Amino acid sequence: MHRRRTPDRRWAAFLGGALAANSAPHLVTAARRRRMLTPLAGPDSGPAANLGWGAINLAAASALVAFAGRAQRRMLLPFTLGCAAFAAWALLYEKVIAPRAAASRASDVSS
C-alpha cells in the first residue's frame, strides 16, 4: 500500500512547494503595506487581503507537506520542483501577461 501512495505524496510535496512559494510574495507585500493582486480582493488588494491570501497558501502548503511526510529526502525534489514551477509561472506573469493586460486596458480607456 505504501508504494501506491508514493505518487500522491509526491504530488502533495510538489503542490506544497508551489503554495509555499506563492505565500512569500503575498506575506512580504502585506508586511510592506503595499498592494498586489489576490483572488480575495482583485487586482488592487491591500495588505490585509495579501496577509490573508499568504496565510491561506502557507497553511495549505504546511498541510500538504505534512501529508507528504515521512520520507523527507524523497519529497525534497518534488517540493523544490513545485517552488520552481511557481517561480517560472510568476516570471511569465510579470514579464509577459501583466504588461499585455495593462496595455490592453490602456487602449480600451483611450478609445
Image: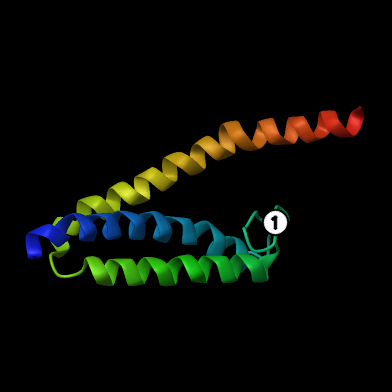
Foreground residue among 28 and 23: 23
Q: How is the image coloured?
A: rainbow
The reply, left or right, for residue 110 in relation to residue 31 is right
Give neighbour class at mark 1: few <14, some 14-19, many 20+ (Cα, 10 Å).
Answer: few
Could you say where residue 24 lies in the image, as x and y percent from the top left?
48, 60
Look at label 1 and name its amino acid. Answer: Gly
The reply, left or right, for residue 50 in relation to residue 57 is right
Could you say where residue 40 lies in the image, as x and y percent from the top left?
64, 63
Q: Residue at x 53, y 57 (%)?
A: 25
Foreground residue among 62 and 47: 62
Could you say where residue 75 lies in the image, as x and y percent from the top left?
19, 58
The reply, left or right, for residue 110 in relation to residue 25 is right
Foreground residue among 3 and 91: 3
Element carrying mark 1: loop
Q: Residue at x 43, y 45 (%)?
A: 87
22 in relation to 54, above or below: above
Quadrant for the N terminus, please: bottom left
Q: Quadrant of residue 12?
A: bottom left
Quadrant for the C terminus, please: top right
The mark tally for this picture is 1
Residue bearing the label numbered 1: 42
The extreme right residue here reads: 111
Could you say where residue 80 lies in the image, as x and y percent from the top left?
28, 51
Q: Residue at x 27, y 72 (%)?
A: 66
Q: Residue at x 70, y 64 (%)?
A: 46
Q: Quadrant of residue 88?
A: top left
92 in relation to 7, above or below: above
Q: Quadrant of residue 102?
A: top right
